[in-house]
Amino acid sequence: MILLTFLSFLVVAIYTTIITVSFEECPRSISEACYRYTNTKMFAGLMGAAAALLVPPALEASTEVSQFLVFLGFIATGIISIAPKHIKSENMESVIHQNVSTLLFYVAQTWVALNMPWFLIAWIGYAVYILVKYRKTNPRLDMYDRLESAKPVLWAEAITILQVYTTVLIGLL
C-alpha cells in the first residue's frame, strides 16, 4: 500500500514539475496546466491515475467513519480531470470544475480532520506565507493582483495534497 501511495504522489509531482520546468514558472493552479498544453487528455489521465492509485491505501488508512470520503474524493477528482478548464469564459465546464474543486477541498480537509486532526495546523503556515507575500508586493496594485501574485490556489492545492498523502502514509504505518 505504501508503494501505491508513493506511485500516486509521484504522478502528481512529476506532472507538476514538468509543467513548472516547461514554462519556467509555477502555474497558478495544477489545473492551469491545461491551458499551457493543448492535450487535456494528459491531465485527465494523470489525475485519474493518481486518484485511482491512492484509493486502496487511503481506504486502509481511513477510519471507518471517513472511508466514504475517500470514494467521494475519487469521484470528485475524476470529474475535475475530465472538466479541467476553469476560466469563467468557458461556461459549464468552468462551473463544474470550480464547484467540484471546492467540494474536493472540503472532502479532503474533512477526511484529514477525521484521521489526523492535528495536521490541519499546516494552514497556519499557508496564511503566514500569503500575508508575507501580499505585504511584499507593490501596494499600487489592486488587492486581487497582490493576492494572485502569491499563487494562493496552487499553494492551497499543494498543502491539501501533502496533508492527504502524509495522512495516508502515517495511517499505514
Image (cartoon, rainbow, N blue to C red):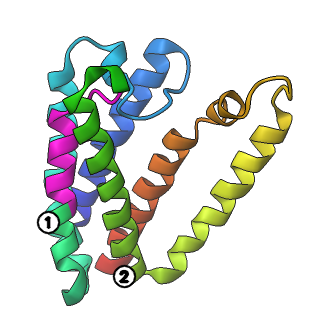
For disc 2, the marked residue is 115
Callout 1 secondary element:
helix
Judge from the rendering whether residue 159 lies leftward or rightward of residue 82; answer left or right. right
Percent across and percent down for residue 51 are 20, 51
Q: Nearer the viewer, residue 167 or 152?
A: 152
Quarter placement of the C terminus: bottom left
Magenta span includes 75: yes
Quarter placement of the N terminus: bottom left
Q: Is residue 85 above or below residue 67?
A: above
Q: Nearer the viewer, residue 170 or 65?
A: 65
Question: How many marks can you see?
Answer: 2
Between discs 2 and 1, the one toward the N terminus: 1
Judge from the rendering whether residue 51 lies leftward or rightward of residue 124; answer left or right. left
Which residue range is magenta in the image? 73-87
Percent across and percent down for residue 128 are 74, 55
Q: Is residue 35 visible?
A: yes
For disc 1, the marked residue is 71
Q: Nearer the viewer, residue 79 or 2?
A: 79
Percent across and percent down for residue 106 are 37, 64
